[in-house]
Image (cartoon, rainbow, N blue to C red):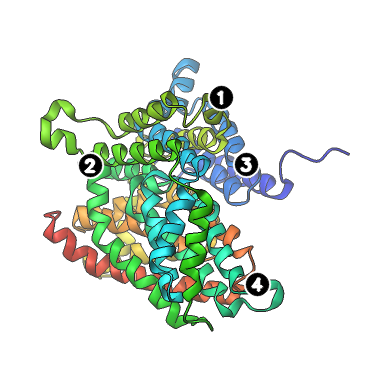
Amino acid sequence: MASLAFKPWPTAMAVLVTLGMWLLLPLPEGLTEQAWLMLALFIGTIIAIIGKAMSIGAISVIAIALVAATGVTGDTPGQAINTALSSYANPLIWLIAVAIMISRGLIKTGLGARIGYYFISLLGKRTLGIGYGLALAELSIAPVTPSNTARGGGIIHPIMRSIAQGYQSCPEQGTSNRIGKYLALVNYHSNPITSAMFITATAPNPLTVELIASATGAEIQLSWLTWALAMLLPGMVAILAMPYILYKLYPPEIKETPNARQVARDQLTELGPLSRHEGIMLSVFLVLLLLWADLPALLLGAGWSFHTTTTAFIGLSLLLLTGVLTWVDVLKEKNAWDTLLWFGALIMMAGQLNESGLISWFSANMEQWIGLLGIGWPGAAALLVLVFLYTHYFFASTTAHITAMMAAFLTVGLSLGAPAMPFVLIMAATSSIMMTLTHYATGTSPVIFGSGYVTLGEWWKAGFVMSVANLLIWVVVGALWWKLLGHY
């Protein structure tokens, strides 16, 4: 008997909730039937994603079909399908897809591994130094690796495991405490921090940018440079604090690692001199950073300014022209095409919820409820951030979580008087900080948790501690930094 293409129980739950909302629940006062149907389809889609009824790409195709077929996005069939597909013209969606294609070059050329071993060769004299080496290696490649799973799980994790095994620290031998547990935790907790630091460091960040623009009536449209500057200081403080916090929380048995630097040097020797393709990849990496930072425009005038997505296409074009990547490589980058498809569907649905007036309706009711607590905008903002952060215990997808909650929470916080720029920036950072919490929080977590170095209880304890530490750093350091930058 052939297996089903979908998981029966999550699929049934998604269908029942969608139909139950649409057909059985009374239409709330102040909402149109179109808005209510759009909400039912949206919630059903989120339930299917959370339950992993199918792959997120397949769910997105079905969502587009249902949105267009029900006519919820237009008065005519033509309008309905045009609106359902409208978000694929959004540059931010293409930015993340093209950046994922570019990041394939880091893996294909071996440059990512070389960078990792280079930092270990510099800092690996002690176990704590290895931790910092892993964290800084992850940070150095974060701007051009929108797949945080590829970065933390595909590039840094093999380096971490090879070092741990070099010190006979293996879960199978019961020796995780020697060094492997600590390095695995640093490997993982570098990931949420670096993801928060650049728009292009994790796939959901452009969705966050889009939702912020929508919630503020396009008054705040975060560019790559604005985001990177805003997150620079709190992110660096978090990167510097994290290895030390985990070192104190789960101290490794081996403190001195004089051989680690030599192991890293041996690996670099094995990799040989920087190859032509590695050199080109590194050059393109630097070109991307300079263009995203708008440096040519600052030096040569506005005519040398490029849109962030245009810059990504320039980078990919250079890699194709030089042969670092081939068109076959681009076609095989399934993650990029998959992300392009499902991002478009979710941004479209989130946009339609806003267009239909549902977000405004929900936010007004939520604002009224929070107002009854009499806690003012500081208390309200803190409550919204904490609820948004810790409800991630119930999500196995940062994208689903952001899509489900970000727009409404942004609207409520701003309506209650929270200073616009600091509030949206802390919410943006929180959308990555929440990855710390569980072993299913994002794609990187099951890869590293699955290596067996950390028990479930240890993982959750470290996750909660780091969520508090990261949030405090972003609130305190971030607030001072954003004041200095003139954001409020």
Count residues near mark 1 (Cα–Cα under 10 Å), then give few for <14, some for 14-19, many for 20+: some
Q: Helix, strand, or loop for circle 4?
A: loop
Query: Of callouts 2 and 1, which one flags the residue occurring earlier in the amino acid sequence?
Result: 1
- The amino acid type, in three-letter code, at marker 3 is Ser
Q: Earlier in the sequence, mark 4 or mark 2?
A: 4
Q: Name the one closer to the observer, 356 or 96.
A: 96
Tell which circle, 3 or 2, labels the residue nearer the N-terminal end: 3
User: Is 216 located above or below residue 419 in the figure?
Assistant: above
Q: CA distance from mark 3 to mark 2?
A: 35 Å
Distance from disc 4 to disc 3, alpha carbons, whole Å, reads 33 Å
Q: CA distance from mark 1 to mark 4?
A: 54 Å
Residue type, numbered disc 2: Ala
Q: Nearer the viewer, mark 3 or mark 2?
A: 2
Q: Give the mark toward the camera: 4 or 3.
A: 4
Spatial CA distance of label 2 from label 1 is 43 Å
> In which quadrant is the N terminus drawn?
top right
Could you tell which of marks 1 and 4 lies nearer the N-terminus? 1
Q: Earlier in the sequence, mark 3 or mark 1?
A: 3
Q: Which residue is mark 1?
A: 69
| x, y percent for residue 474 | 28, 65
Residue underneath mark 3: 55
Secondary element at image label 1: helix
Disc 2: which residue: 293
Q: Residue at x 67, y 44 (%)?
A: 11
Assess whether mark 3 and mark 4 are in contact (beta carbons under 8 angstroms). no
